Image (tube, coloured by chain):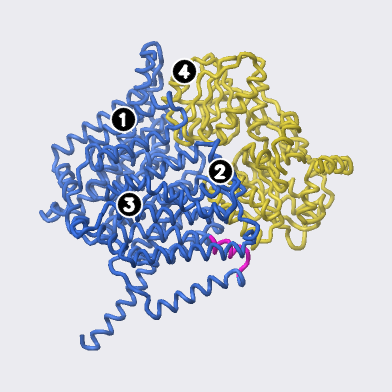
Chain colours: A yellow, B blue
Amino acid sequence: MVMNTTRRSVVGGLGAAGLLMPFSAGAQTPAAGAPIRIGEINSYSRMAAFALPYRNAIQMAQDEINAKGGAMGRPLEFVFRDDGSTPGDAVRVAEELVTRENVSFIAGTFLSNVGLAVSDFANQRKIMFMATEPLTDALTMAQGNRYTYRLRPSTFMQTKMLVDAVKARGIKRWGIVAPNYEYGQSAAANFKRLMAEATPGFEVVAEQFPALGRIDAGATVGALAQARPDGIFNVTFGADLTQFVREGNTRGLFERRTVVSLLTGEPEYLIPLGEETPEGWIITGYPWEQITDPAHVAFVSAYRAKFNDTPRLGSFLGYVFAYMCRDLIAKAGSLDTEVLLKTFDDMKFETISGPVTMRGIDKQATMGAWVGETTLKGKVGAMKNWRFVDGANYMFSEAEVRAVRKG
Amino acid sequence: MDPAFIVIQSLSGLASASSLFIIASGLTIVFGVTRIVNFAHGSLYMLGAYLAVTIVPMLLEVDRSLPMFLLGVLLSALIVGVIGAVMEIVLLRRIYHVPELFQLLATFGVVLIVQDLVIKLWGAVEIPGPRAPSLRHGVFIFDQRFPAYELFLIGMGLVVLGLLWLLMQKTRFGVLIRAATQDREMVGALGVNQAWLFTGTLFLGAFLAGLGGALQIPRVAVNTQMDISIITEVFVVTVIGGMGSVPGAFVAALIIGQLQAFGILIFPKITLVLVFLLMAVVLVVKPWGLFGKPDAAAGRAILPEGILSLKRFGRVDTIIAGIAIAVLLALPIVGDNYMVKVGIEVLVLALAAFSLQFLIGVGGIVSFGHAAYFGLGAYAAGLLVTRGGMAMEPALLLAPLVAGGFAALFGFFIVRLSGIYLAMLTLAFAQIVYAVCFQWVAFTGGDNGVVGVWPSAWASSRQVYYYLVLAMTLAAIIALRHAIYAPFGYGLRAARDSAIRADAIGIDVGRIRWFAFTLSGAAAGLAGGLYSFSKGSIDPTMISIPMSVDFLVMVLVGGIQTVIGPVVGAAAFHSVKDFFMPLTDFWRLFLGLSIIMMVLVFPRGIAGATSALVDRKRSVTLPAGGV
């Protein structure tokens, strides 16, 4: 209850002043003085497909921000560290960043287990942690803590968006294929729960949980086809997905079936599908080339000019994240952890994908996602019929949060 | 079940089996001749795939036809073959004389290097390969479509089997390979040019790995994690089939392929466990695999690897140990938080490495899955605290008991084997533990693990916890060291050096090895328990293959012939990793190079090299004294 009053008073007190605008920042003189340091921990070597575009965008944003005056008149400096893709290494570099590099707070991580370990570290050391990419619900729910915030829409939110997009079709017989680890299992569980609520008579006729990174695609496709589902919910991604799609295409698994698929529209996963991209899958993703919002267009052209590469979802995320750091610090006017936490709860941000609120009760941002369908344009995959879905409507209900979160 | 479905599903299984066989045949031939378990075989497979996604599209630009596709595949495989031959000449040739374990580590160094080079050359994003022209379609089998390319793959498996049979039976090269597989010293004694035989074998093995990789490009997106995901499976196939046996690899691949195709229908979640369970069962029932034969050299008297003579602490050693302990005691006072954190990790790893050295150096039991017991200790402590609501103190006491219990259970089967099969069985058990922790989300938290494993209030300050860790690791290391110097240790070494003689003088070889395994597992479990409280969480990476390899590297770096070496090794290894990781994204490259340099320059490790230096000084001064 204490949290609730705090939340209200913050919302009330901040009101319109909470809307900080990254693109009309007043000061145009470059920042001076000792930099404000932010520790960024990510899987730069093992998950480089995501992490390098992400780091690129952060560095680009950092240059822009500092040219425009930084925050509190001081420049921002992101200190990057590889987490070795293991929780053990991640917690050690987090310690190094806090103790040796004097960072004001830490951020980043890709894998959910690394994110959870760093979040627990933040809880112990009483330092703020802004988790950018990890998707597990546990991070803001069962294992959430007051120092950990998450930017991206969680597994639950993205699954709910997809269920919303497909429930009108009234499909009852479903097959599920998900990688056998926490992310895959919880996505499958969320899907079953949400679909059962949305569609009477919903049943799962086949479930396949291939080991992550080593799908036996032929056998998996055979097992799914055998059960003759009318719809398929896919959670595989990366190399598993490509293999699954190829095998399914050749064997006709996707013909006359509705396929719903998490994350498949993100360039990281869509580009490798190439000309194998199936038609009409309902997906979450990032149609960067089709978004016409001027702020976003400016971001895309700056990114392309600077890196001679197209942006990935990681780039988008890194860019938004860097500006959120600046706005947060500028508004807090202090680097004290308690002040940062208090400011961050329920703070509103203007981002290149629209307004985002950091909901205080579970410290989950309302950042949305793009939901649409896959299509083949020439020899490359793309998204069509997409729309941007505001995450605010897809969060866990406040009652659920209160029931599950400990602090 | 629908008979049509059974046919289709078993064809899918055959296609996977065929791919597996092509790759595994290369590994098994290389092992048969050189006795090196080539960890880098998976890297060669990955290189084959990357080369093919580069070469094949270029050729298809010229002419979009199946022959062009096959030409590209063949070219890629040949290039990989040459890479394999170069690897033999540059690296392997220099390490045939070093202990098996170090050869294995050197090839693991190659794995690390290739991983980073591939990222550097091809980027981190997976690359979809072109489909094979004229084989894109599905063939109708009982009104179901089956990919034509997979029928082709099944055919390729048979073709490779046939060609290998011809090569082995009808050519001189093949005869030599078979001869060397049976008894390579005899082949050398008969005047065969071993250098060329080995280079040729590596070429053949690498060619097969490359071929296996190149043939995958129409099915998979080529990615940087292909190497590790294939190598464990290929190990399983070669071990089940019997190392060195090509027909064995074929049969084992068939079994694995079908097991996976039908296993996922009944147990959709435990395919990972299934294959390792099969491997464990096969090794327990048939210790040399299905078609393997006992090593001809196994009966010969060879100089054992490990600790040969025990030295007691001299005055200098005592002074050094005293200084080391004084430095450790002073660390929290002079160092910052981060240094204390690193100090805790080094101490914990030192204990784990020491317990492994106890097995390898004293017992001659090369455990390839020592992380299992480390991880079991960590999980026991973590789960007891978070799920059982237990305090830190009893949890820390129970951690070694649980790990020791599992070590006793697994060890019961493990210690009956020897050499590479023993190592593979330890790996199998470790992978089973890993898979259970990784996939049993409801109980273990899956890959997320469990967080909130923090020490009791009195030990929550990092400095206090450091002293706790220091006290417990030191006590455990001293206890283990005492066991090495006690009659138990001498008995264990006797069992290692000659099981038959040890048996004859009344040592129960099986039991003493079993006790050693259990004791070592318990010590590793204590290290794991201490580690989990220092980190605040548990997760499956603590049990993974890389963790086991890290422990082996620490033992290697420290020196396998010394008692206290692993402690030095743990400190050196951890510091190097800690130093490189913040500096560069390519830290694996440096780590790999360091491992290889270590094997080449200091095959006896840091502590081993130092004592060798001391010995040499003595032997130089002694003759002057007129001995």
Q: CA distance from mark 4 to mark 3?
A: 49 Å
> Which residues are drawn in magenta?
B335-344
Relative to A288, B182 lies left or right: left
Q: Is residue B247 above or below residue A87?
A: above
**Disc 3 designates what residue?**
B514
Q: Residue B84 at what x, y percent from top left?
A: 31, 48
What amino acid is at disc 1? Ile
Amino acid carrying mark 3 in the image: Trp
Q: Earlier in the sequence, mark 1 or mark 2?
A: 1
- Dot 1 corresponds to which residue? B255
Q: Name the quarter where the C terminus of chain B is drawn.
A: bottom left
Q: Position of residue A211 (x, y in %)?
A: 47, 34
Secondary structure mostly seen in the magenta stretch: helix
N-terminal label among 3 and 1? 1
Camera-nearest label, 4 or 3: 3
Whether residue A190 is situated above or below residue A5 in the rendered picture: above
Q: Marks 2 and 3, how far apart in space?
A: 31 Å
Q: Which residue is mark 2?
A: B449
Q: Residue at x 29, y 37 (%)?
A: B282
Is disc 4 placed on a helix, strand or loop?
Answer: helix
Marks 1,2: beta carbons within 8 A:
no
Residue B312 part of the magenta segment:
no
Between the residue at mark 1 and the residue at mark 2, the CA separation in whole angstroms equals: 33 Å
Instruction: Identify which amino acid the numbered label 2 is placed on.
Output: Gly
